[in-house]
Image (spheres, coloured by chain):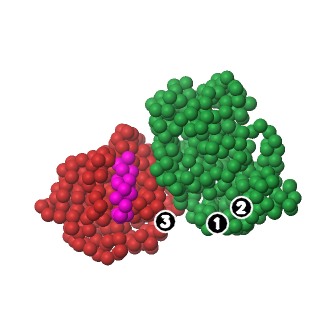
Chain colours: A green, B red
Amino acid sequence: MDIVITGGAGFLGQRLLQALLQRGRLSDAGGREQPIGRITLVDVVPAQTFGDARVTAVTGDIGDPRLVETVVTPDTSSIFHLAAIVSGMAESDFDLGMRINFDGSRALAEVCRARGHRPRLVFTSSVAVYGGVAGAVVHDDTAVTPQSSYGTEKAIVELLINDYSRRGFLDGRVLRLPTICVRPGRPNAAASSFASGIIREPLNGEAAVCPVASSTRLWLMSPSKVIESLIAGHELPADALGANRIVNLPGISVSVAEMVASLERIAGAEVVKRIEWRPDPAIERIVATWPPLFETTRARSLGFRGDDNFDDMVREFLSERGSSAPTSSASSTHS
Amino acid sequence: MDIVITGGAGFLGQRLLQALLQRGRLSDAGGREQPIGRITLVDVVPAQTFGDARVTAVTGDIGDPRLVETVVTPDTSSIFHLAAIVSGMAESDFDLGMRINFDGSRALAEVCRARGHRPRLVFTSSVAVYGGVAGAVVHDDTAVTPQSSYGTEKAIVELLINDYSRRGFLDGRVLRLPTICVRPGRPNAAASSFASGIIREPLNGEAAVCPVASSTRLWLMSPSKVIESLIAGHELPADALGANRIVNLPGISVSVAEMVASLERIAGAEVVKRIEWRPDPAIERIVATWPPLFETTRARSLGFRGDDNFDDMVREFLSERGSSAPTSSASSTHS
């Protein structure tokens, strides 16, 4: 198996790399497990390769079609397409967001088509394709209503991947990620950055600002469950997906108050005092458009599994904080 | 008012031109009716201008961004974007469909953005954004599930127009047209071409082939109601639409058997005998994915009106067949 990971230097890309190296095998188009021979990481910043001979890092911009043509070869069996401009930046720089999130994805799909051997393409979409449905439960057949350019670009690429899959140009799998929590590293330009910050910073002995009300509900998934889902999404037989390649992943719906209560149970009242409650109307407005509750019937029937409770998600962060897990957030992060 | 009609040489474009010339006025961004000073028709084939000094015909390809920059000027107040590669052709020539239906629409939206004065853009989308929901009733919040490249391209442009409207780059209005019936002229490469053909050809003394079973239900709208809807869509205040610029237009749900019964009532049993029933599995497969029934609550609350019954739609065709209405179908036709 010859694998490409876009956004390979990012937090998810590096976690996925480690999981794939550890696993050592992935299913081919015929459903048979094959050893992983090569993993190519593509990112705008140099990616860590952990000295593994199977791993190559390519530095470049997936908005550049020539780069995409170089990294996706006739040998490429699978692509994990994680690279994206995050929501806040895609909103403030419309052209950049369109060039990377849309044109880059289209170029990738076009190269798959040109190669002609129908590689598997796992694409990380986002719950940001839904906007303005606050309060309502999102079902698998709820219409997308993005209220951000990031969400729009993700929704457009989903449609493209469905059509490219239908036509046999590639074998797409689109996973709509919940907000990832607890994300290691530093805050980023995503409007959801606080969701990890209010847990991570206090645990690291730092102050954190919570820009939304404690009653705000979020739809969350831990890093480990996201990585499991990316691999499970790759391993699904194409027939199990049929014409619709899009899956809303099973998150858990947690209020900010419940998140803080978990933090207090696990780390104590003093740690929680490091959170400063300072409402930011701009962020509240964006977060208010994200649906906090999904009925993920399809994902569960396909075998995807979410987290059990938020306490475990805090513990996952604590147990991995001490490890050598990379915490780069320079690129390729989500929503 | 300075108006651009893409697909201006097509059947709908020419009907819209005549309706606008007759009407003489359209609402400006402030909601005040203003005289129509200029109408520019853009199409790949020369468009009829009916010798009206207000009308200019530009021949060119909306897939060419330079052409789009020429026709959309700082004076352009409104654009009716009707140009499209029809479903059958977009399926057989993927690159052509993407270039005209997607890239051309994006170029148009980009020029609006560059001009900076937020022109109104009325875009004709299609019920082809829905596929594989046969049997189910489509509601305003039903997720799109295109099963054709044409439907995919329309759905992508819808998302783009919503985001461009949200950002204030343009003032979009997306109307999802039912299958238009009875369309004058000749058959075209649309999979829905038979829907008009089985009425039009027998009335013209010619044989017609019906490639689907008589139990097949279709979601139909007459040419006159489509034109009324395009103008009503333009005239709506932006506030009435809000963040969601997409409207499923109210068609009527009619079975092929009911259509033929209308034809017999109006034209007699001999005329109906000119229909040859010859199932075409390829067309049946496509048509089977089109939803035949919609609940168009939003359209009705916005004031859009559909047809009353199919008999009137047959009579509309008969009454206009004798008139000077152009019947060109060389371009810019739908679904």
Q: Residue at x 74, y 30 (%)?
A: A22
Residue A12 part of the magenta segment: no
For disc 3, the chain is B
Q: Label 2, on which residue?
A: A209
Q: Residue A9 location, x and y as percent?
A: 63, 38
Q: Residue at x 53, y 35 (%)?
A: A60
Q: CA distance from mark 3 to mark 2?
A: 30 Å
Q: Label 3, on which residue?
A: B243
- Range drawn in magenta: B103-120
At mark 2, the secondary structure is: strand
Residue type beneath disc 1: Asp
Residue B106 part of the magenta segment: yes
At mark 3, the secondary structure is: loop
Above or below for A3 versus A260: above
Q: Nearer the viewer, mark 3 or mark 1?
A: 1
Q: Residue A314 location, x and y as percent?
A: 79, 51
Residue type beneath disc 2: Val
Q: Label 1, on which residue?
A: A280
Q: Residue A94 location, x and y as percent?
A: 48, 53
Q: Residue at x 52, y 27 (%)?
A: A73
